[in-house]
Amino acid sequence: MRYLVLATDYDGTLATDGLVSQEAVLALERLRASGRRLILVTGREVPDLLRVLGPMDLLFDCIVAENGAVVYWPASHDTKILSERPPDQFVRALRERRVEPLSVGAVVVATSTSNDTTVLEVIEDLGLELQLIFNKGSLMVLPSGVNKATGLAAALAGMGVSPHSVVGIGDAENDQALLSFCGFGVAVANAVPFLRERADLVTQAADGAGVAELAARLLATDLAGLARHT
């Protein structure tokens, strides 16, 4: 096989409104049965993701969470945090300014894009080296250099797999790092224009149906004849 791993985003890619269709689940199961491996790469925090996935988490060999900051292995429940936790003074300042919604993970701090100016002001006031990452209507704050590509690299190192053997699929701005890092990058039909323009392939179907479409092509042809977008 040319491509040994499928790395997929969750919200807006595999899932629609937080839920995964039976069509998409069956497609992932067929990929696993073919000997391929599956990695979920998401901005969500692990506890939240496990709540929505339920037993489906075991479909995945590895989960890259918090937009690349955390790697979780479902079979063993091992967790590796790849960067430092958010500074207490940063979180405290956001709460003092009543930034809502506000979610604080092991590393990521997440809110809505409507708060981007306030978040940036706090970062500048405190002199912190943090980056803003946009995900459609969501805003994530992470240490500089942390993204889906760095998290996937850590997961692949643990699996002993080269990124050249990976197909990545996503829908949002923060998936560009993922698609660029993989051997082949795919955008679902509902992806933001920025991502569709840079993908090697755009599926005809949206969300989980697009993932199922890609899975079928992988099983049928291993994407033979498709070249990397330049």
Image (cartoon, rainbow, N blue to C red):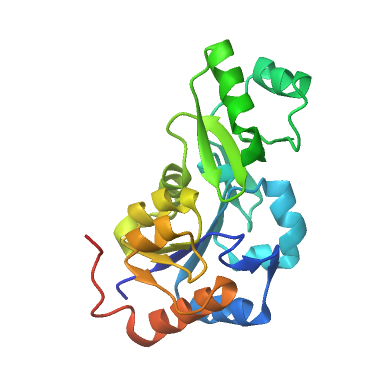
Task: Please state if 63 lies on the left or on the right of 197 as rendered.
Answer: right
Residue at the outermost top position = 126
Q: Residue at x 40, y 66 (%)?
A: 186
Q: Position of residue 104 (x, y in %)?
A: 70, 33
Q: Is residue 136 above or below residue 97?
A: below
Q: Is residue 53 above or below residue 147?
A: below
Q: Is residue 91 above or below residue 125?
A: below
**Residue 34 visible to an observer of this rendering:** no
Task: Please state if 198 lies on the left or on the right of 136 as rendered.
Answer: left
Q: Position of residue 195 (x, y in %)?
A: 41, 58
Asked where in the image residue 165 lies, by quadrant, the reply is bottom left
Asked where in the image residue 125 lies, by quadrant, the reply is top right
Asked where in the image residue 56 lies, by quadrant, the reply is bottom right
Q: Nearer the viewer, residue 68 or 62?
A: 68
Q: Is residue 226 above or below residue 71?
A: below
**Residue 50 visible to an observer of this rendering:** yes
Q: Residue at x 57, y 51 (%)?
A: 136
Residue at the outermost bottom position = 220
- The N terminus, quarter of image: bottom left
Q: Position of residue 54 (x, y in %)?
A: 75, 63
The number of numbered discs placed on residues in the rendered structure image is 0
Q: Position of residue 193 (x, y in %)?
A: 43, 60
Task: Please state if 147 lies on the left or on the right of 102 as rendered.
Answer: left
Q: Nearer the viewer, residue 145 or 118?
A: 118
Q: Residue at x 47, y 67 (%)?
A: 37
- The C terminus, quarter of image: bottom left
